[in-house]
Amino acid sequence: MSDALAALRARLDDLREQARSVAAGVDRDADLNEGKARFLGRKGAFGPVMRELGSLDRAQRPAAGALINEAKQAIEAVFAEARARIEQKALDAALEAGRIDVTLPGRRSAPGATHPVQAVLDELVDLLVELGFALADGPEVETEHYNFDQLNMPASHPARDMQDTFYLQGDLLLRTQTSPVQIRAMEDTKPPVRIIAPGKVFRCDADVTHSPTFHQIEGLWVDTDVTMADLKGVLSYFLRRLFGADRGVRFRPSFFPFTEPSVEVDVEFGDGWMEVLGAGMVHPRVLRNVGFDPTAVQGFAFGLGVDRLAMVRYGITDIRYLFENDQRFLTQFARGR
Ligand code: DAH
């Protein structure tokens, strides 16, 4: 081998050695690319070497070219190895970071439970359906006509003040009671009418026993011979089924514009009584308003306070618990856990 070739080989060996040490020292992609460019890039270490090829004897050039190619390939290989090492390290780090400890206890999911108001509502509806009442329905956004006028509560009637009404546009309002469904049911059917109408009602009122949204079940039974004795019998039986025979129940005379006579019914609760429903014999004027003849048919109506009944049922002393959706409260009613 000529001196010139020997010198070239030594130089290439030196470059390979340098490349190896550079490649061994990098552990980031960017450093690796930069290091590789220092040898193999356009302005890299091979540029001057190639230029010197031209100064060699023509006869020596093929051998020199072969030596250079061999060195380039070896350096490529060195950086390829370094790249593989960096990628493996990144993969190891990702696997380590994402490691899952399968022995950790799982998170419990909290399955939904029937809300106590819904539970009591379902129970009440089932009982009343068993007693022969059919389900009826009406809108939550009502007209003054159905919510008040037809129920014998004209605009000037002081009883309207008993119910703090949320008025909407025009003569629309959020129904303050389920009683308008009585009117709608009687307009839709000839007697006998025997319906219940469960639903939400709204009043501008809030304290321990009043919530702005609450639930009622309206009941209506109109036929040729339905009497006050039926009213008392049906409602007493109903409350006994709910709370047992030992629970005190009392009927008090009361007033509602759409019934005459009217009663309110209280149930024993704590040291006292909780009013849970209003009822009465449907007022003749209400019957006439829907085209019924009060000399031919009569009946009774009632309005149950579902939230009140839920409070008595579960011994809840503040109605607001029912509407706050506090998990600590609600989970107490979840069964099977
Ligand atoms: N609508 C009444 C209220 O919300 C409750 C009521 C009382 C309904 C007597 C009736 C009834 O059907 O006969 O205060």
Image (cartoon, rainbow, N blue to C red):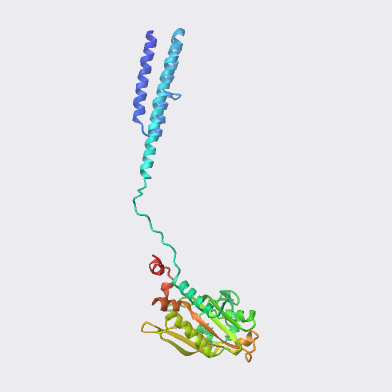
Residue toward you, 250 or 321: 250
Determine whether, in the image, residue 128 is placed left or right of residue 326: right
Which part of the image, by quadrant, shows the N terminus? top left
In terms of image quadrants, where is residue 92? top left
Q: Residue at image x 54%, y 81%?
A: 219
Residue 202 visible in the snapshot: no
Q: Position of residue 161 (x, y in %)?
A: 52, 84
Count of all numbered marks drawn on residues in the image: 0
Residue 92 visible in the snapshot: yes
**Is residue 75 shown above or below 239?**
above
Q: Residue at image x 35%, y 54%?
A: 105
In terms of image quadrants, where is residue 80? top left
Q: Position of residue 87 (x, y in %)?
A: 40, 35
Q: Where is residue 305 in the image (x, y as percent from the top left)?
A: 48, 79
Q: Residue at image x 44%, y 85%?
A: 266
Residue toward you, 207 or 330: 330
Which part of the image, by quadrant, shows the C terminus? bottom left
Residue toward you, 276 or 229: 229
**Is residue 13 shown above or below 4?**
below
